[in-house]
Image (tube, rainbow, N blue to C red):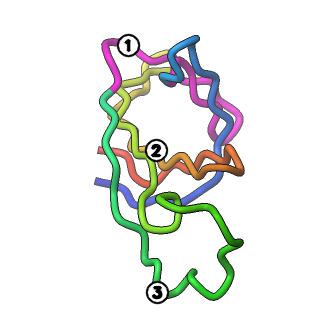
Amino acid sequence: MIQVDESVAVVTNHDGQPISIDWRGSSYLASGSPVRWYARKSWWTEAGQAPKGIGPQLVETEMWRVRAHHESEGGVFELRHNLPEDEWKLVRII
């Protein structure tokens, strides 16, 4: 497992599922069905910066596990999708 925590560009399908990930100059194409879940944020470190009315986004973040490949390289990518900013981060590669 490789810990990463880097911003990435993600293209999604009409259902919001990641279909490609651009990371370090390479485009990785998703294969299979990505898995989505929600994880708890460290809200106690972010609460002082939170704007009013964001509700559940204060304590939960959308996570995705995507099997993806580029040429002969590939792996399982764990992504964090920060809303409402629509920012994607690559958290780790398994």
Please name the residue that numbered disc 1 is placed on: 31
In front here: 31 or 34? Answer: 34
Please name the residue that numbered disc 3 is placed on: 44
Residue at 30 percent of width and 30 percent of height? 35
Of badges 1 and 3, the one in the foreground is: 3
Q: Amino acid at mark 3?
A: Trp
- Distance in Å between CA atoms under marks 1 and 3: 36 Å
Q: Earlier in the sequence, mark 1 or mark 3?
A: 1
Residue 48 circle label: none
Q: Residue furthest front?
A: 53
Label 2 environment density (alpha carbons within 10 Å; few <14, some 14–19, many ≥20): many
Residue at 45 percent of width and 55 percent of height? 61
In this picture, residue 42 sits left or right of residue 76: right
Q: Earlier in the sequence, mark 1 or mark 2?
A: 1
Of badges 3 and 2, the one in the foreground is: 3
Residue at 71 percent of width and 51 percent of height? 85
Q: Amino acid at mark 1?
A: Ser
Q: Amino acid at mark 2?
A: Leu
Q: Relative to 40, does residue 46 appear above or below in the rendering?
A: below
Residue 22, horizontal then vertical, whole percent:
65, 32
Please name the residue that numbered disc 2 is placed on: 79
Q: Relative to 27, does residue 23 appear above or below in the rendering?
A: below
Q: Earlier in the sequence, mark 3 or mark 2?
A: 3
In front here: 32 or 54? Answer: 54
Per the rendered image, the range of residues in magenta is: 18-34
Q: Relative to 16, does residue 55 appear above or below in the rendering?
A: below
Residue at 42 percent of width and 59 percent of height? 60
